[in-house]
Amino acid sequence: MVKTALLYNPKIREYSFGKGHPFTSERFEIFLKFIKKKLPNFKSFFGEITPPTTSSKDLELFHVKEYIEIMVKASKGTILPNIFKYTTVDNLDPETGYLPEGIEEAARMVVGSSILAGELVLKGKPSTRAKLGAGLVPHRNKVSGTGFKKAISLGGGLHHAKSEKGEGFCIYNDVVICAKKLLKEGVNKILILDTDAHAGNGTSEAFWEDNRVLFIDIHQDPRTLYPGTGFLEEIGKGKGEGFTVNIPLPMGASDDAYQYVFEKIIFPLAEEFRPKIIIRNGGSDPYFNDGLTNLGLTIDGFKMIGENVRKLADKVSQGKEVDLIASGYNKEILPFAWAALIAGLLNLNIELKDPDKSLAPSKNSGLEETKEIVEELKKILRNYWRCFQ
Ligand SMILES: [Zn+2]
């Protein structure tokens, strides 16, 4: 059986913004414990890998040198008077007002993990360099090392980081760097599917003028949520015009609304584009009771997203998919939703139910509005894609 690579470096524990901040990193180990308990034969499905860190050279595939140097300094406890040129306040420890110590190194680990996830999916195994000691350590049980079609990078999906500035709890954009590494390897068609509740503004910036990457971003209406971008009309520029696709959903958008978007937009576009690899990013924050957002997915909805991504990958990219997962602000829900995404993605039989569904929106909440949004989007995109003509 082909195993899925599950990448987690315990040093990512340092990717934490401190007490009172919504993003803290105990999430990763809570999740691992949860899924291992829910899936007694865990080891027959997953090859656990401890990924290496990454070099500044790889970070520079997207980020400017000056920004990287400032992050290194700031994360060593140095007080920088011009720090707000490089980061928004949401990337600082709310108690101290500084960048948490050690977080830059952890952010590098996240990027290293997502780069390796891309490499494993592309080649089925790690490259010689990785094997020879860039830090690749098979985790406890032996990793067969060949035949990976899917890889999950825990901690990945930091889609708000821009080339010169960090924001939205994101320091380095591993989604972008993973894709840029694959482009360098000659993979000339990549689909990035961003299912996080927030629009991926950093990723959008990176591929705005690039037709080798189709960026489909499904998120809460930017009029009602950070970062305030990701409107229907934002479709890219120059060669990349038509290759950025934003699907802003109304507040409360339910499982049915998401399913509708997969059927009417995501599948037709991906089938026409025919990517060689799919990169999906996003954790549990579209959950109806996330706390930080206002969408309407239930646990079944997360499983449905995973299932759709699996079917899509089987159809268009020979099953090759990289999964980047980190977000989610309701800590009780997070392990359930992440496990549901992964269960759908890998067709695993895991018993998962919403702990409390009493406040969930109706099954078709937001569907009618979503249908209108889909029609409008098809009109905008019909000059670029045959499937919408
Ligand atoms: Zn988010």
Image (spheres, rainbow, N blue to C red):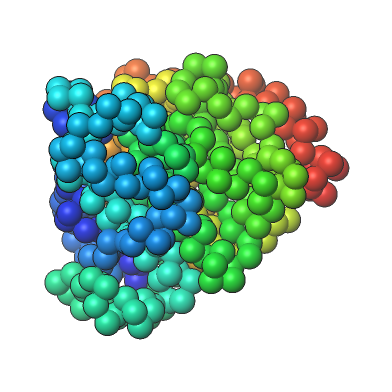
Residue 291, horizontal then vertical, whole percent: 31, 22
Number of callouts? 0
In terms of depth relative to the viewer, which is nearer, 15 or 223?
A: 15
Give the residue at x 74% y 27%. Answer: 376
In the displayed structure, 356 sits above or below 224; it is below
Q: Image quadrant of residue 79?
A: top left
Picture layout, residue 295 above or below residue 188? above
Query: Whole-percent x and y of residue 62?
Result: 48, 51
- Decide which of 263, 331 is in the foreground and name it: 331
Q: Which residue: 23% across, 38% down?
A: 74
Place of residue 313 in the rendered image (x, y in percent of width and height, measured from the top left): 55, 60
* Left or right position of 310 against 16: right
Residue positioned 62% across, 27% down in the render: 231
- Name, please, the residue furthest toward the front: 81
Place residue 93 in its image quadrant: top left
For the N terminus, which image quadrant? bottom left
